[in-house]
Amino acid sequence: MTTIDDLPIRDDLRGQTPYGAPQLDVAVRLNTNEHAFAVPQPVIEEMRKRLDAELSDLNRYPDRDAVALRTDLAAYLGHGLGFASVWAANGSNEVQQQLLQAFGGPGRTALGFGPSYSMHPLLAAGTGTRWIGSLRDPDFGLRADAAVAEIHRHDPDLVFLCSPNNPTGTALDPAVIDAVLGAARGMVIVDEAYFEYARSGTRSAISLLPGHPRLVVTRTMSKAFGFAGGRLGYFAADPAVVDAVQLVRLPYHLSALTQAAARAAVAQSAALLATVEQIKVQRDRIVDTFRGRGVQVADSDANFVLFRTADDQKAVWQAFLDRGVLIRDVGLAGWLRVTAGTETETTAFLTAAEEIL
Ligand SMILES: *Cc1c(COP(=O)(O)O)cnc(C)c1O
């Protein structure tokens, strides 16, 4: 049988394993931070109408620049943004890959502060960008002076910040992002995949865009919009950054069907985001219940909670799975991550936790 090792694959990809959270058939799946609620009926109707209008034109390529969708997304973001400041692709992973293709690549470096989103170093590897894994503080926070010192030490071409941070859950103080922008020579990418779940009063890095042409804020419809299967991510930045990614994107990368379905979802954002508050309630319920029981948890501005396990986290993960609850081992010794689900799912998790922890 032929294996990867028999192929003339790039040396830097040898021995690597692909990204993959287990997709197991379990009753309660709280492992990949998807939005717990199914797409509401009015949104389905809107999508059906818009998809139907596209079908007879599928002999034609879609709008290569997705201008109508980018206009809708800019209006959703607010901050006075127009379509020229917004770019969209098949998930924020693709958006970030395009940014690495344009601003990273062989001979260049990207720096991030772990523990953070595991895809950032994988996207760097895939684009031949050398990854520099700096660390957050022991309490998972990130102090401005520590971040600035790391940037001065390594002088990276790109800096990745994640706010709210996955897997820890806490949003960054914009003052930290401001300090990083002041210290970095290269691009600063702030991954705000979970921004809609942030605790009230949390400021988006989008507010820092004026006067900062090297800042890029990425968002996704995979989480709060409940549109993970639709694959749509986007960023807001100076229009020059949009010009830059157009040099590397594949022509017609966003299908007409994706654009139509995403526009329907944005048009119905009020209906889609209506359940975000319910998820936040369940998230805070997990945090409060655990703290009440003396279990250490990180502050969460996201739809998940990182909690401390007294025993080996692999064994605890398995104990939850044995009770029909799939959560996430993010490879952080002594910690596990759980997505806040519906009230019923969260109750199932907390009931299992009561037995296990
Ligand atoms: C889930 C997640 C994303 C989403 O990626 P998509 O490609 O948009 O589905 C991006 N960043 C972080 C930190 C995430 O956790």
Image: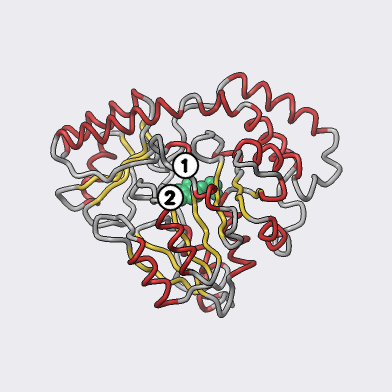
Above or below, 11 relative to 33: below
Q: Amino acid at mark 2?
A: Ser
Q: Which residue is mark 2?
A: 163
Q: Earlier in the sequence, mark 2 or mark 1?
A: 2
Residue 253 circle label? none
Identified at 46% across, 58% down, the residue is 178
Quarter of the image where one finds residue 221: top right
Say which quadrant the C terminus sits in.
top left
Residue 119 location in percent, x, y? 47, 58
Q: Residues within 10 Å of mark 1 (few under 14, many from 20)?
A: many
**Residue 213 lies in quadrant:** bottom right
Disc 2 residue: CB within 8 Å of ligand 1: no
Judge whether 260 appears above or below 21 on screen: above
- Residue visible at 23% across and 32% down? 288
Q: Are marks 2 and 1 in contact (CB under 8 Å)?
A: yes
x then y, percent, for residue 80: 64, 41
Is residue 234 found left or right of 239 in the rendered image?
left
Most extreme residue toward the front is 211
The CA distance from mark 2 to mark 1 is: 7 Å
Q: Which residue is mark 1?
A: 195
Q: Nearer the viewer, residue 150 or 94?
A: 150
Q: Position of residue 121 (x, y in %)?
A: 46, 64
User: Which residue is located at x 80 percent, y 45 percent?
Assistant: 62
Q: Label 2: few (<14), some or many (≥20) within 10 Å?
A: many
**Mark 2, secondary structure of its residue:** loop
Q: Nearer the viewer, residue 349 or 201?
A: 201
Query: Which of these two is toward me, 132 or 311?
Result: 132
- Residue type at tag 1: Phe
- From the viewer's perspective, is residue 55 above or below residue 137? above
